[in-house]
Image (cartoon, rainbow, N blue to C red):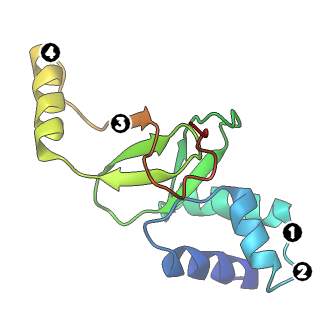
């Protein structure tokens, strides 16, 4: 494996459970390695996604950028809550939701193969970067 690949993979392992855009990865790694370029980061992220090491999602927020967001593929299915203000992503697993989705698919004559659920709202955390002041 090449140096950039190892650095990017290490970055995701050190930050497991966190979601990053290519720009986030680039900016974090550029602090340590001035040789790594944004195009290299994009290329490696695409390769890792194709190899099944990373998962890619597109989440909307008030920032309106709709950038691809990557996370380490740790094998367990999960869903997402996304803050419309700051773009923060929380992962969750809820068996009742999973069962309901399987039941809906079955009732409509489908055998559910896979799905993606992203719920959007306004996080109530005091440190929400873009929370509108009230």
Q: Is residue 3 left or right of residue 35?
A: left
Mark 1 and 2 residues: CB-CB less than 8 Å, in contact?
A: yes
**Alpha-carbon span between mark 2 and mark 3:** 37 Å
Q: Of the numbered discs in the image, which one, if any, rests on residue 37?
A: 1
Task: For the N terminus, give its image quadrant.
Answer: bottom right
**Alpha-carbon span between mark 3 and mark 4:** 20 Å
- Residue under label 4: 109
**Alpha-carbon span between mark 4 and mark 2:** 53 Å
For marks 4 and 1, the one nearer the N-term is: 1
**Alpha-carbon span between mark 1 and mark 2:** 6 Å
**Alpha-carbon span between mark 3 and mark 1:** 32 Å
User: Which quadrant of the figure has residue 7?
Assistant: bottom right
- Residue under label 2: 35
Mark 3 and 4 residues: CB-CB less than 8 Å, in contact?
A: no
For marks 3 and 1, the one nearer the N-term is: 1
Residue drawn at 75 percent across, 58 percent down: 23
- Residue under label 3: 117
Of marks 3 and 1, the one in the foreground: 3
Q: From what the image shows, is residue 24 above or below residue 1?
A: above
Q: From what the image shows, is residue 89 above or below residue 35?
A: above
Q: Residues within 10 Å of mark 1 (few under 14, many from 20)?
A: some
For marks 4 and 2, the one nearer the N-term is: 2
Residue 90, percent across and down? 40, 53
Of marks 4 and 1, the one in the foreground: 1
User: Which quadrant of the figure has residue 73?
Assistant: bottom left
Q: Residues within 10 Å of mark 2 (few under 14, many from 20)?
A: few
Label 1: element kind? loop
Residue 69, percent across and down? 59, 51
Task: For the C terminus, give its image quadrant.
Answer: top right
Label 3: element kind? loop
């Amino acid at each position: 494996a090449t140096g950039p690949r190892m650095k990017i993979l290490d970055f995701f392992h050190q930050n497991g459970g966190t979601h990053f855009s290519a720009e986030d990865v680039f900016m974090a790694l550029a602090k340590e390695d001035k040789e790594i370029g944004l195009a290299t980061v994009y290329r490696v992220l695409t390769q890792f996604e194709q190899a099944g090491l990373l998962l890619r999602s597109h989440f909307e927020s008030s920032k309106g950028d709709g950038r691809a967001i990557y996370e380490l593929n740790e094998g367990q299915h999960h869903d997402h809550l996304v803050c419309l203000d700051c773009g923060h992503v929380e992962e969750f697993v809820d068996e009742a939701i999973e069962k309901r989705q399987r039941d809906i698919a079955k009732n409509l004559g489908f055998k559910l193969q896979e799905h993606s659920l992203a719920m959007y709202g306004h996080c109530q955390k005091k440190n929400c970067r873009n929370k509108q002041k009230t």
